[in-house]
Image (spheres, rainbow, N blue to C red):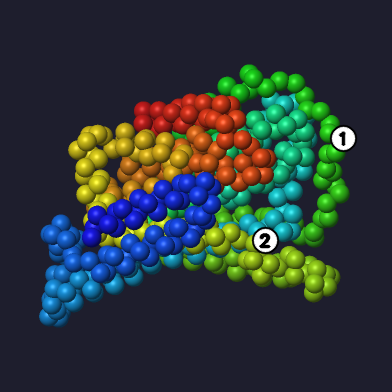
Amino acid sequence: MELYIVIIFVLGYLAIALEHPIKINKTATALITGVLCWTLFALDVPSLSLLESSHYSMFAQSIKNGMGLSSEALYRLFIKTELSHVLSQIASILFFLMGAMTIVELVDAHHGFRFITDRIKTKDVRKLLWIICLVTFFLSAILDNLTTAIVMVSLIRKLVHDKEKRLFFAGMIIIAANAGGAWSPIGDVTTTMLWIGGHISTLAIIKNLLAPSLVCLLVPLIYLSFKLKGNLQEGSHSESVKDEVYVKGGKTMLFIGVGALISVPIFKTITHLPPYMGMLLGLGVIWVVSELINPDLDEAEKRKYSAANALSRIDVSSVLFFFGILLAVGALESMQTLHHFATYLSELLGDNRIIITLIGAVSAIVDNVPLVAACMGMYSLDVYPIDSMIWEYLAYCAGTGGSLLVIGSAAGVAVMGMEKMDFIWYLKKISFLALIGYLGGAFVYLIF
C-alpha cells in the first residue's frame, strides 16, 4: 500500500505543477491528495519498515506501558496520534499566515503603503531600479514576498510607462522579493514553516542569510545596471497618485501593522509561545485601531476599511492549498517514507549541500512549500538540531530558487498576471540574472 500512497502523492504533485495546462485548481488537487494519502495509510497493514522504525517503537513502548492493546488497535491509535500531531503543526502555520495576510490587507485598505511609495521621485532608470529593488528586498522581509511584489509592481506602473523597461523592473522585483523573504522568519512561507517548526531561530537566520540573500539580489542588479540607461518618460495616460482618495490614518495603520509583524519574533522569544499567538495578538490590536480610526465615516463607508472586509479579501485558496499539501507530506513523514528517501539521497550524492542546492533549483518548477515540508520530514531535528547548516541553507535555496522561472514562486505568478509577462520572455531575459544571483548567494553562504 505504501507504493500506492507514493504514486498518489507523485500524481498529485504533477497535477499541481501542471495546474494551468490541465485547468484544475491546485488547491483542489492538494486537498484530494492529502486526504487520500491518510485514508490509504489508515486502511493499510503496517509495513515491516514502519514497525521496525525507532519512531513507531518509541510510540508502542509508551502506550503499552499503560495499557494492553492488540497490534491492530495500537496501529489505529498510532494513526490518530500522528494525524493529530500533523494537524497541530499545520494549524500553527495556517493561523500565522491568515493573521499576517489580514494585517497586510488592513494596511493596504487604508492606503498605508503609499507612505513609502510616494517618496520615490527619481526619473533616472538605473537609480530608480536600485531604489525599487532595495525597497522590495527589505519590505518583503517585513511583509512577505507576495504582498511586496504586488505593492511594488503597482508602484512601477505609475512610474515606468515603457513596457519593455517595466518588464525588466518587474523581473527584478520578483528576484528582490524572493531574496528579501528568505532571510526573515516572516518574509517567506517556507522560512516561516522552518521557524515555526523549530528548525531555525530568528537572530541566527537573519545573521547568517542576510549577506547571501543580499548578494543574490546585488549580482543581477549590478549586471542589469549596465544594460538599462536613460531617463523615464512621462506617460500621457499616467495615473496620478494624488487622484486617489486618501484615507485618514493610513500612516498610523502602516506603523502599527509593521510593528505588529516585527514584534512577533520578540513575542515568541519573551513568552516562548508559538509565533501564531503573537501574530493573532497583533491582528487583534490593529483590528481595534481600524474600528476607532475613522469615527466620522458612515457605516457603509466604514465597512470598506474594516477587518471583516480585509478577512474577505485574503487568499483562502492559498491557505487551503498549504493545508492539503502539508497533510499529504505529513502522511509520508509518519510512514517514514521521507526518512528512507533522505537516507537514499545521502548515499547516492554523499553531500547534503548538493541535495539542498538541487532542491532550490527544482523549486523553480515545483512549488517550494511541499519541497520544504518534505525536507523537514526527511531530516530529523535529532540529527540536525536548530540552526544547523542544512536548515539555513534550505531556507535560502527554497526561498530564492523560485526566481529561476516566473512560475517558480507566488511572487512570480502574481507579477506574471499583473504585467501579462510571457514565460519565454522571462526565461530569456531574467532567468540568467536569477541564476547568477542564486549561485552567488549560495557561494557566499557555503564559503563564509
Residue 312 to residue 238: above or below: below
**Which label sits on residue 236?**
1
- Tag 2: amino acid: Leu
Lateral position of residue 396 relative to residue 389, left or right: right
Q: Residue at left 46%, top 46%?
A: 17
Q: Residue at left 71%, top 20%?
A: 229
Categorize mark 1 by other alpha carbons within 10 Å: few (<14), some (14-19), many (20+): few
Lateral position of residue 68 relative to residue 11, left or right: left
Residue found farthest to the front: 22
Q: Picture quarter containing residue 301?
A: bottom right
**Which label sits on residue 106?**
2
- Which corner quadrant holds the C terminus? top left
Badge 2 vs badge 1, beta-carbon distance below 8 Å: no
Q: Residue at left 21%, top 44%?
A: 343
- Which corner quadrant holds the N terminus? bottom left
**Which label sits on residue 77?**
none
202 and 367: which is toward the camera: 367
Residue found farthest to the bottom: 67
Q: Position of residue 65 (x, y in %)?
A: 13, 76
Q: Position of residue 12 (x, y in %)?
A: 40, 54
Residue 66 to residue 430: above or below: below
Residue 343 to residue 232: above or below: below
Element at label 2: helix
Element at label 1: loop
> Can the viewer see residue 66?
yes
Q: Position of residue 91 (x, y in %)?
A: 44, 66
161 and 124: which is toward the camera: 161
Residue 384 to residue 304: above or below: above
Residue found farthest to the top: 226
Q: Tag 1 or tag 2, which sits nearer the N-term?
A: 2
